[in-house]
Amino acid sequence: MIKRPPRGLLLLEGRALFEFASLLPALPALRRAPRGDGQPVLVLPGLMGSDLSTRALRGFLGRLGYPVYGWGLGRNRGPSAQVARNLVERLKELRRRHGRPVSLIGWSLGGIYARELARRFPDDVRQVITLASPFRDPDATNVPAALLARREPHPDERLFRERLGAPLAVPSTAIYSRSDGIVSWRSCYEEPGSERESLEVASSHLGMGYHPIVLLAIADRLSQPEDAWKPFQPPAGWGWPLVPRVGLPTDSVSASD
């Protein structure tokens, strides 16, 4: 089990307002973000979020030329059989409409949805990008227990949890923050390996979908040619925290820290 983040980090979640406000001065850099080949992109919100919460992210990607879509299911009140069916239909419909695999971006719980869609339908998914998504241990969180209780229990909970953290058959990028006050960063990173990576940013949980550094990292990942995925390379001459830090911290990643 992974420990939940220290409750003191919740005080830092107020940064989200400043991260949203930082979009304006960051506009010159955001306008120079790399552009890809116009692949379709589906963006999934976090717990209790809706498409309104991902509007800034989707607007940014739309201006880069991507046909980008919200999930269209209202407020994300937690996983259910109906949500799973609707997400499959949404993915399949976008795949048919564009005739090519869809890139998935999921914020928090939305990232878990995105990973499971990619696990079930790898031929329909080009890549997965998760933002502060606790797929290694969904309970390592400061989310109120009443909200977590909305999830319908799985018949084999142990097997279900093992599967959540298992590698995907498509390229995956996990973006996380060690100062996240909502979920433990240790539950959000991807084990390094072929076509999978972790990027650390200095962001709050609630503001990650607005953070300019996160948006630029997403643009970089989406701009890669299809079937030619390469690990993220920070721009020459730029250092942390102005660019993501690749991989995991050099200190321990054990659950006891």
Image (spheres, rainbow, N blue to C red):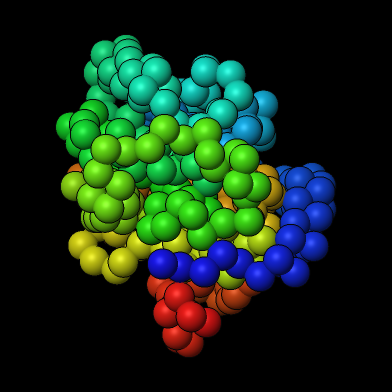
Q: Nearer the viewer, residue 81 or 145?
A: 145
Q: Where is residue 159? Give x, y as percent.
A: 23, 50
Answer whether residue 174 is visible to the viewer in this image.
no
Q: Nearer the viewer, residue 132 or 224?
A: 132
Q: Residue at x 71, y 66 (%)?
A: 7
Q: Residue 89 appears in which quarter of the rendering? A: top left
Which residue lies most toward the bottom here? 251
Q: Residue at x 30, y 34 (%)?
A: 117
Number of marks in the image? 0
Q: Where is residue 191? Give x, y as percent.
A: 31, 66
In screen coordinates, is 50 left or right of 195? right
User: Measured along the vertical axis of the image, is residue 206 above or below residue 149?
Assistant: below
Q: Residue at x 39, y 18 (%)?
A: 82
User: Measured along the vertical axis of the image, is residue 40 above or below residue 118?
Assistant: above
Q: Where is residue 163? Give x, y as percent.
A: 25, 50
In screen coordinates, is 22 left or right of 207? right
Q: Residue at x 63, y 56 (%)?
A: 142
Answer whether residue 169 is visible to the viewer in this image.
yes
In screen coordinates, is 256 left or right of 47? left
Q: Where is residue 156? Give x, y as percent.
A: 25, 44
In screen coordinates, is 169 left or right of 76? left
User: Measured along the vertical axis of the image, is residue 47 above or below residue 84?
Assistant: below
Quarter of the image that includes the N terminus: bottom left
Q: Nearer the viewer, residue 232 or 2?
A: 2
